[in-house]
Amino acid sequence: MANLRDPYQVLGVGRDTSADDIKQAYRRLAKQYHPDLNPGRSDIEHRFKEISSAYGLLSDPVKRARFDKGEIDAGGNERFDRNFRRHGARTQRRPGGDPFGGGINAEDIFADLFGAGRRRTGPGAGPGVGGAAGGTKTRGGDINYSVTVSFVEAAQGVKRRVSLSNGKSIDVTVPPGTIDQQKLRLRGQGLDGAAGGPAGDAIIEIHVESHPLLSRSGLDINLEIPVSLPEAVLGATIKVPTLGGTVALKVPPGSNTGTLLRLKGKGIHDEKKKLQGDQYVTLKLVLPDPPDPELTQFIEKWAKHRTYDPRKKLGIG
């Protein structure tokens, strides 16, 4: 088996890097080397698997600590120094060149590591090497992946094909209403377990791209839309974007900046709770740019005989 690179080097971070910075490094590299963005590139696929494996180790605080201590290698496998003996939670150094020292039989060590199937044979001893099946069932490690979807796809739900480190490609369902950094768990799609133990899981972190106009608050969608002076004063029907496409919206006469209009049922659907959000549209009055000379002259004449104080309710003198 080829030696795995140091996970810190793979992600391009230092050993004192915080967990958040490690996550950011992984996200950046995962986007750059994702196989879906580089079809047909076996070198890119290998690099992506290497990045995912490195993050899978460093994102787990326990595994990261054990790797830093030299207890496991970059693949998460136990590492045993020839001059050390692991026993329970202790690590004891043995004097001299004998890796087991102190008259301890080597097969006792294998019994500790691999189970009764490796015990010594002899009078009064348990089954020999060829006896009971050895090894302790150990669950395989989880592997982290990332998937990027648009704002609308996250709100409405979408399927994404994910290439796993084991060579499989599976379709992942991103449920409607998914939020940024929400995680999906694919059971049994992680690293293989040891000695017949269960496989780990694949953890899919969803990254939601921002929308240039829309934002969300729970199940509701928010939109700030500019309107002209004639539209605000006289009323109008304008087109506004929604999750399902462009719809017509009536602007009432005499509308102002901050006027809030509702598009019922145009928000996010929650299947579990059987709820449907709305879309709220906030109007923003925008004057001509550059200023219109005729409008300016009209306002000057109008203002001479009609005055109003929009800040009166604020108590500002």
Image (cartoon, rainbow, N blue to C red):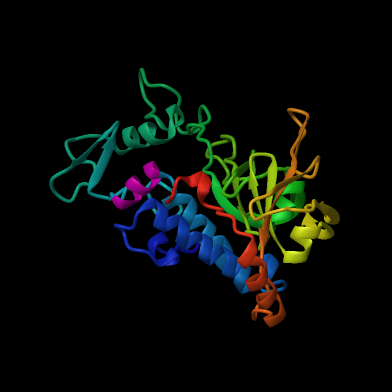
Residue 63 in the magenta stretch? The answer is: yes
> Residue pushed farthest front?
305
**Residue 38 screen position, x and y as percent:** 67, 72
Quarter of image, res 46: bottom right
Q: Is residue 297 above or below residue 248?
A: below
Q: In this picture, is 26 found above or below 72?
A: below
How many numbered marks appear? 0
**In terms of depth relative to the viewer, which is nearer, 30 or 280?**
280
Extreme residue in the top direction: 124
Q: Which residues are magenta?
A: 61-68
Judging depth in this view, the residue of 314 and 49 nearest the camera is 314
Q: Which residue is rendered at x = 85% and y = 55% of the image?
A: 247
Which of these two is toward me, 26 or 39?
A: 26
For the stretch drawn in magenta, the main secondary structure is: helix
Spot occupied by residue 82 in the image (x, y as percentages of width and height): 27, 50
User: Residue at horizontal 37%, vertical 64%?
Assistant: 13
Residue 56 in the figure: left or right of residue 269 = left
Q: Position of residue 76 (x, y in %)?
A: 44, 49
Looking at the image, which residue is at 45% across and 24% down?
A: 127
Residue 34 visible in the current orientation: no
Q: Is residue 279 magenta?
A: no
Instruction: Residue 138: tell me if it is visible.
Output: yes
- On the image, the x and y values in percent for residue 288 come to 68, 74
The residue furthest left is 95
